[in-house]
Image (cartoon, grey):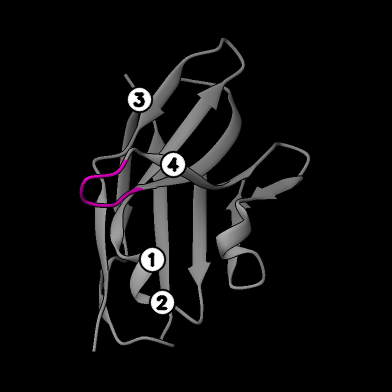
Protein backbone atom coordinates (compact mmCIF):
# COMPACT_ATOMS: atom_id res chain seq x y z
CA UNK A 1 0.00 0.00 0.00
CA UNK A 2 1.30 3.43 -0.98
CA UNK A 3 0.96 6.40 1.35
CA UNK A 4 1.81 10.01 0.59
CA UNK A 5 2.14 12.53 3.41
CA UNK A 6 2.25 16.20 2.54
CA UNK A 7 3.30 19.11 4.69
CA UNK A 8 4.32 22.75 4.46
CA UNK A 9 1.19 24.59 3.44
CA UNK A 10 -0.13 27.67 5.21
CA UNK A 11 -0.92 31.35 5.01
CA UNK A 12 1.68 33.69 3.56
CA UNK A 13 1.71 37.30 2.40
CA UNK A 14 2.21 38.16 -1.27
CA UNK A 15 5.88 37.99 -2.13
CA UNK A 16 6.53 35.43 0.57
CA UNK A 17 7.80 31.86 0.35
CA UNK A 18 6.69 28.38 1.34
CA UNK A 19 8.21 24.95 0.94
CA UNK A 20 5.99 21.93 0.44
CA UNK A 21 7.12 18.38 1.13
CA UNK A 22 5.63 15.05 0.16
CA UNK A 23 7.02 11.80 1.52
CA UNK A 24 6.02 8.54 -0.10
CA UNK A 25 6.08 5.18 1.65
CA UNK A 26 5.12 1.70 0.59
CA UNK A 27 6.11 -0.84 -1.98
CA UNK A 28 6.54 0.77 -5.39
CA UNK A 29 9.01 1.95 -7.98
CA UNK A 30 8.55 5.64 -8.61
CA UNK A 31 8.92 7.16 -12.05
CA UNK A 32 7.62 10.71 -11.93
CA UNK A 33 6.85 12.86 -8.89
CA UNK A 34 4.84 16.01 -9.22
CA UNK A 35 2.76 18.75 -7.69
CA UNK A 36 -0.71 19.79 -8.77
CA UNK A 37 -3.05 22.44 -7.44
CA UNK A 38 -6.75 23.11 -7.42
CA UNK A 39 -8.22 26.54 -6.77
CA UNK A 40 -11.87 27.00 -5.80
CA UNK A 41 -14.12 26.54 -8.79
CA UNK A 42 -11.28 25.42 -11.02
CA UNK A 43 -9.96 22.10 -12.25
CA UNK A 44 -6.86 20.51 -10.80
CA UNK A 45 -3.80 21.51 -12.80
CA UNK A 46 -0.19 20.48 -13.03
CA UNK A 47 2.28 22.82 -11.34
CA UNK A 48 5.59 21.00 -11.72
CA UNK A 49 6.98 17.51 -12.11
CA UNK A 50 10.35 15.78 -11.93
CA UNK A 51 11.50 12.49 -13.41
CA UNK A 52 13.99 9.89 -12.22
CA UNK A 53 16.67 11.57 -14.34
CA UNK A 54 16.01 14.91 -12.67
CA UNK A 55 14.32 16.45 -15.68
CA UNK A 56 11.76 19.02 -14.65
CA UNK A 57 8.67 20.55 -16.16
CA UNK A 58 6.85 23.68 -14.95
CA UNK A 59 3.70 25.41 -16.03
CA UNK A 60 4.32 28.92 -17.31
CA UNK A 61 2.73 30.87 -14.41
CA UNK A 62 5.25 29.44 -11.90
CA UNK A 63 8.41 29.41 -13.99
CA UNK A 64 11.19 31.33 -12.30
CA UNK A 65 9.35 31.34 -8.98
CA UNK A 66 8.86 27.67 -8.04
CA UNK A 67 11.48 24.94 -7.87
CA UNK A 68 10.74 21.23 -7.66
CA UNK A 69 13.33 18.85 -6.25
CA UNK A 70 13.51 15.24 -5.22
CA UNK A 71 15.33 13.19 -2.60
CA UNK A 72 15.56 9.71 -4.06
CA UNK A 73 16.80 8.11 -0.86
CA UNK A 74 13.83 9.43 1.09
CA UNK A 75 11.25 9.08 -1.70
CA UNK A 76 10.38 12.71 -1.04
CA UNK A 77 9.52 15.52 -3.41
CA UNK A 78 9.69 19.20 -2.52
CA UNK A 79 8.24 22.35 -3.99
CA UNK A 80 9.98 25.58 -3.09
CA UNK A 81 7.62 28.45 -3.82
CA UNK A 82 8.99 31.99 -3.89
CA UNK A 83 7.46 35.33 -4.82
CA UNK A 84 4.03 33.95 -4.09
CA UNK A 85 1.01 35.69 -5.55
CA UNK A 86 -2.66 35.66 -4.52
CA UNK A 87 -3.42 33.62 -7.64
CA UNK A 88 -1.22 30.84 -6.28
CA UNK A 89 -3.85 30.24 -3.60
CA UNK A 90 -5.07 26.65 -3.93
CA UNK A 91 -4.96 23.20 -2.43
CA UNK A 92 -1.70 21.62 -3.51
CA UNK A 93 -1.50 17.86 -4.11
CA UNK A 94 1.51 15.69 -4.73
CA UNK A 95 1.27 12.83 -7.16
CA UNK A 96 3.55 9.94 -7.90
CA UNK A 97 3.48 7.81 -11.02
CA UNK A 98 5.09 4.41 -10.87
CA UNK A 99 6.83 2.43 -13.57
CA UNK A 100 3.85 0.06 -13.50
CA UNK A 101 1.70 3.06 -14.53
CA UNK A 102 -0.13 3.50 -11.24
CA UNK A 103 -0.84 6.98 -9.91
CA UNK A 104 -1.12 7.94 -6.26
CA UNK A 105 -2.21 11.23 -4.73
CA UNK A 106 -1.52 12.97 -1.46
CA UNK A 107 -4.28 14.32 0.75
CA UNK A 108 -3.63 17.93 -0.25
CA UNK A 109 -2.31 20.91 1.65
CA UNK A 110 -3.82 24.39 1.59
CA UNK A 111 -1.72 27.32 0.42
CA UNK A 112 -3.24 30.76 0.93
CA UNK A 113 -1.53 33.91 -0.30
CA UNK A 114 -3.14 36.99 1.18
CA UNK A 115 -2.28 40.22 2.92
Does the image show residue 31? yes
Residue lying at the far front of the rendered structure: 41
Give the residue pinned by disc 1: 88
Circle 3: element type: loop
Q: In which quadrant of the rendered view does residue 19 lie? A: bottom left
- Mark with earlier residue (3, 2): 3
Circle 2: element type: loop
Give the residue pinned by disc 4: 45
Q: CA distance from mark 2 to mark 1?
A: 5 Å
For residue 18, above or below residue 40: below
Give the residue pinned by disc 2: 85
Q: Residues within 10 Å of mark 4 (few under 14, many from 20)?
A: some
- Residue 41 forms part of the magenta stretch: yes
- Residue 108 forms part of the magenta stretch: no
> Which of 93/85 is in front?
85
Q: Which is closer to the viewer, label 3 or label 4?
A: 4
Q: Residues within 10 Å of mark 3 (few under 14, many from 20)?
A: few
Could you tell me if the residues under marks 2 and 1 are in contact, i.e. CB atoms within 8 Å?
A: yes
Circle 4: element type: strand
Residue 2, which numbered label?
Answer: 3
- Mark with earlier residue (2, 4): 4
User: Magenta part of the protein: which range?
Assistant: 38-42
Q: Quadrant for the N terminus, please.
A: top left
Q: In which quadrant of the rendered view does residue 64 lie? A: bottom right
Q: CA distance from mark 2 to mark 4?
A: 17 Å
Amino acid sequence: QVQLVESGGGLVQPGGSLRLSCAASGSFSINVMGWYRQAPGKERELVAEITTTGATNYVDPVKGRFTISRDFAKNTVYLQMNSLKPEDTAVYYCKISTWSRNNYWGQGTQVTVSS
